[in-house]
Image: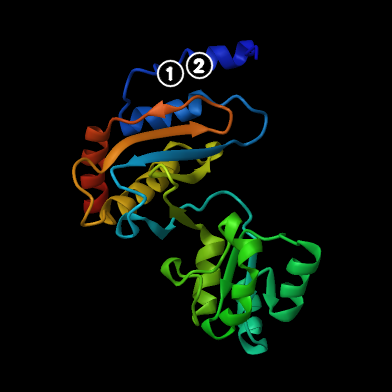
């Protein structure tokens, strides 16, 4: 497929063979934007894990200090009392049977995050074939099965994301929008890396953060210098 002139100009800004410092990477994100819409910034992290081993699989929640830039739609499964609490906290949808029927009968998926109280998970579990493949099934490991509905809703609305490795041992995550600017994107980026770095499985041997690439929705991948990243994390941890 023939690439446009603008894309080729952007491509020339990034050396595929070079590893860029954290600051250089975030600066290039701004320079390589080319879409008319506000592009999402994503990271891909190749980890030194064996995804076939259950004790080396990662699944966790990360609170992005500046959110994702997306209006997150939250669905809460609970009894009436907790549903009222969820709505007060900012949930877009809250209830139980009516939403289960809407999902199973209409294949409705007009939400981004699903939270559930533990007592109704026996019913919610039946939605596995609808929610599971889309990564929407509530899970206590990432704080989406909880009795503290208010806190869970507020965190999800504020920019809590779920990250997990794929079959190739790679973690993908959004860290915001290009319009966030350099400082906010850098802080979100380091927040994700920091949590993943601290979650290294004890059975994982050798280099853990093997390759990290950052890109815009429409831009080329930018390889991050993992050595510089480790130094940035030291400073980030000290400031946290």
Q: Looking at the image, do the residues carrying marks 1 and 2 touch, with CB atoms under 8 Å apart?
A: yes
Residue 100 in the image: x percent, y percent? 71, 74
Circle 2: is it few (<14), some (14-19), or many (20+) Cα within 10 Å? some
Residue 218 in the image: x percent, y percent? 58, 28
The residues bearing labels 1 and 2 have C-alpha atoms spaced at a distance of 6 Å
Residue 64 visible to an observer of this rendering = no
In this rendered view, identify the residue nearer to me: 51 or 202: 51
Circle 1: is it few (<14), some (14-19), or many (20+) Cα within 10 Å? many
Return the residue at label 2: 11
Answer with the quarter of the image where residue 80 lies.
Answer: bottom right
Return the residue at label 1: 14
Determine the secondary structure under disc 1: loop
* Residue at the extreme right of the image, as rendered: 106
Query: Which residue is rendered at x = 70% and y = 71% of the image?
Result: 93
In this rendered view, identify the residue nearer to me: 60 or 42: 60
Residue 165 visible to an observer of this rendering = yes
Q: Is residue 100 above or below residue 208?
A: below
Residue 85 appears left or right of 204: right
Residue 82 in the image: x percent, y percent? 61, 85
In this rendered view, identify the residue nearer to me: 162 or 1: 1
Query: Where's the N terminus, which quadrant?
Result: top right
């Amino acid at each position: 497929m023939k690439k446009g002139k603008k894309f080729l100009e952007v491509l020339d800004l990034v050396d595929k063979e070079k590893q860029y410092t954290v600051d250089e990477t975030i600066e290039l994100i701004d320079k390589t934007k080319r879409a008319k819409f506000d592009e999402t910034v994503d990271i891909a992290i190749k980890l030194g894990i064996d995804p076939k081993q259950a004790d080396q699989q990662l699944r966790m929640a990360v609170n992005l200090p500046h959110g994702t830039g997306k209006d997150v739609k939250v669905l809460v499964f609970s009894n009436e009392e907790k549903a009222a609490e969820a709505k007060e906290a900012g949930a877009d949808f809250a209830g139980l049977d009516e939403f289960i029927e809407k999902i199973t009968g209409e294949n409705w998926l007009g939400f981004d995050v699903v939270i559930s109280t533990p007592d109704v998970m026996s019913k919610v579990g039946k939605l596995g074939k609808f929610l599971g493949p889309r990564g929407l099934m509530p899970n206590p490991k990432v704080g989406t099965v909880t009795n503290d509905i208010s806190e869970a809703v507020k965190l999800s609305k504020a920019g809590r994301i779920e990250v997990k490795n794929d079959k190739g041992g790679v973690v993908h995550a959004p860290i915001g929008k290009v319009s966030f600017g350099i400082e906010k994107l850098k802080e979100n980026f380091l927040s994700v890396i920091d949590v993943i770095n601290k979650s290294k499985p004890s059975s994982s041997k050798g280099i853990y953060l093997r390759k990290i690439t950052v890109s815009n929705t429409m831009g080329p991948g930018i390889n991050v210098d993992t050595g510089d990243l480790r130094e940035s994390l030291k400073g980030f941890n000290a400031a946290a």
